[in-house]
Image (cartoon, rainbow, N blue to C red):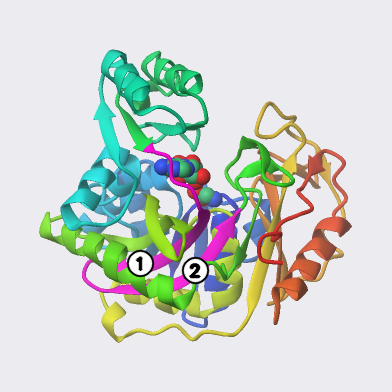
Amino acid sequence: MNILILGGGGREHALAWAIRQNPKCDRLFVAPGNAGMESVARLVDLDILSGPDVIAFCEENAIDLAVIGPEAPLAAGVADDLRAAGFLVFGPSKAAAMLEASKSFTKAVCDACGAPTAAWARFDAAGPARDYIRDKGAPIVVKADGLAAGKGVTVAMTEAEALAAVDEAFGGAFGAAGAEVVIEEFMEGEEASFFVLCDGTDCLPIGTAQDHKRVGEGDTGPNTGGMGAYSPAPVLTQAIQDDVMARIVRPTVAEMARRGTPFQGVLYAGLMIRDGQARLVEYNVRFGDPECQVLMMRLGAQALDLILACAEGRLAETAVTWADDHALTVVLAAKGYPGAYEKGTEIGGLDALPRDSSQMVFHAGTALKDGALVATGGRVLAATGRGATLAEAHARAYALADAIDWPGGFYRRDIGWRAL
Ligand code: AMP
Ligand code: GLY
């Protein structure tokens, strides 16, 4: 079959790498992709937020399956457009993507289906939001309601910080995304990510992971898109996973179906675990990046079979073949990230590195310029290892990262510290 992947980050490179390994995959395209994917797919210059443009490409190239990586095309309704045109799609409708695109929507769904999450309130003006914060006190969490590229959340340890976050959101710092604000109870505990394929009716867990959101070692400094991840996450024991399926994921999927907006795609539940109990922090309606890199490393070629079963509504009859393995990925970012950073710095040493089913450098933001590989983004590479133990995966990932010659970049040395 011919497959089109939308997106151009490390997540999409990992998806393309896994999908390419499956003999069912004939031609593979990625739009826009990046320099790292050229060995596994054909890169396409396409406006991935435009349904008509994506449909035209699918028609011209006899695409059998479209896999949508990032949230932006989902929130823009590209999956709906493709389905209406008769294409098989992996990714939720615009209405179901609200589970990521609106925090108050998700909170209302949780309340309707009884899924445990932080107590919350929603505001569309600063005055009442400020009163609420003064009443509840700190710590407290302030969130822009809409998509704010991961920057809309303030975990405020003091009342002053929370009040400043409210002023920032209503002052227009997040554009329309901040026109409404959700204020939440602060949840203590250990965070982990749980990935579940949903076909509208049935659900299939496909793995757990733990991200490292802070830029600095020891989880210090500003938040980022994620500086490294590993899978599985030992904190998500089988008992907790079963409980999350029963009390959070299945009720959510049933509630979405009941509303006439069934969820189809990967539901990424961000969970807070404390004393063996999980509560929902948030949903995302796509794979995490860099969590996808470790999931794909572990699933390998079967990722396509699972994605296909999800898109075709066959999850009830589908199972994951689990290997008793571990994967870990280390993100290499441009110096300065998540603040201002230089673009176009040259990266060397990649060609000499091994690449196989237990070690792979996924590209997140690279391009070829005059024959040289250069960095084009904040997060640029994801050095990923797989092994029988987490320590082995860790050693492989760091051996790759250490061998990359990129003076313009940096990476955390402590990815995996919680589990190691
Ligand atoms: P989100 O964009 O909703 O994932 O929030 C970003 C990060 O803020 C999460 O990954 C958590 O680390 C933190 N966070 C969000 N909501 C809460 C909460 N209610 N209590 C504690 N931490 C939170
Ligand atoms: N790594 C976190 C995310 O993709 O949202």
Q: Which residue is mark 2?
A: 236
Q: Is residue 215 left or right of residue 399?
A: left
The picture places residue 367, in percent across and down from the top left corner, at 69, 45
- The vertical placement of 121 against 165, above or below, is below
Q: Amino acid at mark 1?
A: Val
Q: Residue at x 62, y 51 (%)?
A: 212
Q: Disc 2, ligand 1: is the CB inside 8 Å?
A: no
360 and 203: which is toward the camera: 203
Mark 1: secondary structure:
helix
11 and 232: which is toward the camera: 232
Whichever of callouts 2 and 1 sits on the residue coming sooner in the sequence is 2
The majority secondary structure of the magenta stretch comes to strand
The picture places residue 54, in percent across and down from the top left corner, at 37, 50
Q: Which residue is mark 1?
A: 244
- The answer to whether the residues at label 2 and label 1 have Cβ atoms under 8 Å apart is yes
Mark 2: secondary structure:
loop
- The vertical placement of 338 against 348, above or below, is above
Q: Amino acid at mark 2?
A: Leu
Q: Is residue 143 left or right of residue 367?
A: left
Magenta includes 205?
yes
- The vertical placement of 419 against 141, above or below, is below
Which range of residues does the magenta coloring cover?
185-211
Answer whether residue 88 is visible to the viewer in this image: no
